[in-house]
Image (spheres, rainbow, N blue to C red):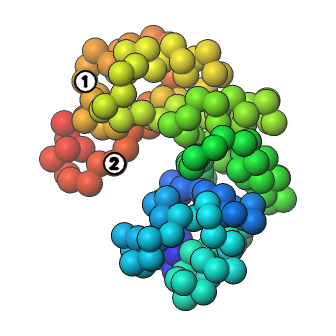
Amino acid sequence: TLPAFKKALELGCDGVELDVRLTRDNKVVVFHDESLKRLYAFDELISELSYEKIKNLTDEKIPLLRDVLHIIKDMKLINIEIKIDGKFSGILEEQVIKTVKTFDISDRILFSSFNPLSIGIIKRLKRDARTGFLFDKNASYKELGSVLASFLGCESINPQYSILNDFMMIHYREWGLKVYTWTVDKKEDLKDI
């Protein structure tokens, strides 16, 4: 929500990660889940709703990317995770690049995705885009993630923290990749990595 991003600024955060999705009418919204079910008790997919309908169902709590960027544009790092739902079209990537360009902050944006096609589209649209390849502990290509990330021209590899170990870190660094892990919620987990 917009208040959450404002709070991050108040707390002095120098960067954030946010998820973007495409609505039925091709608006880029900032929202993690593919549907409204978990947070709003409506079993409706974001991709099947117009932005007006989403605003009505959520009391305008799901913001557009442009509104979020207006608030956080001065942060040092903004990691925009591209969430692809259903049929892949490339429209989300095009809209995200277009929105970011209006703020002239491309040098502080990292585009990340679990979908290598999405990363490829981002790089095709903006050759110098900073990108990161995401994957979780269930990915069958953990060891090959660095090869894929390198092939895609990624700056970073973004694995789930639970798969990191000394071997994997050395492996990723040998490929020249930065490592941005996620979601570390406990202090003891942070110490382990």
Q: Residue at x 82, y 53 (%)?
A: 98
* Callout 1 crowding tier (Cα within 10 Å): few <14, some 14–19, many ≥20: few
Q: Give the SS element for disc 2.
A: loop
Does residue 144 lie above or below 50 as drawn?
A: above
* Rendering coords of residue 191 (x, y %): 20, 41
Does residue 95 appear anywhere in the picture?
yes
* Callout 2 crowding tier (Cα within 10 Å): few <14, some 14–19, many ≥20: few
Q: Residue at x 46, y 60 (%)?
A: 33
- The numbered disc on residue 156 is none
74 horizontally vs 105: left or right: left
- Nearer to us in this view, 186 or 34: 34
Q: Give the SS element for disc 1.
A: loop
Quadrant (top left, top right, bottom left, bottom right) of the C terminus: top left
Q: Earlier in the sequence, mark 1 or mark 2?
A: 1
Q: Residue at x 62, y 64 (%)?
A: 48
Does residue 177 lie above or below 88 as drawn?
A: above
Classify residue 179 by image quadrant.
top left
* Rendering coords of residue 63 (x, y %): 62, 73
Judging by the rendered image, the residue that carries numbered circle 1 is 165
* Rendering coords of residue 126 (x, y %): 80, 36
Q: Residue at x 58, y 29 (%)?
A: 116
Classify residue 136 by image quadrant.
top left
- Nearer to us in this view, 28 or 172: 28
Q: In whole angstroms, how far apart are the C-alphas of marks 1 and 2?
A: 15 Å
The amino acid type of the residue labelled 1 equals Asn
Does residue 74 appear anywhere in the picture?
no
The amino acid type of the residue labelled 2 equals Thr
Does residue 158 lie above or below 29 as drawn?
A: above
- The numbered disc on residue 183 is 2
* Rendering coords of residue 118 (x, y %): 64, 36
- Nearer to us in this view, 30 or 157: 30
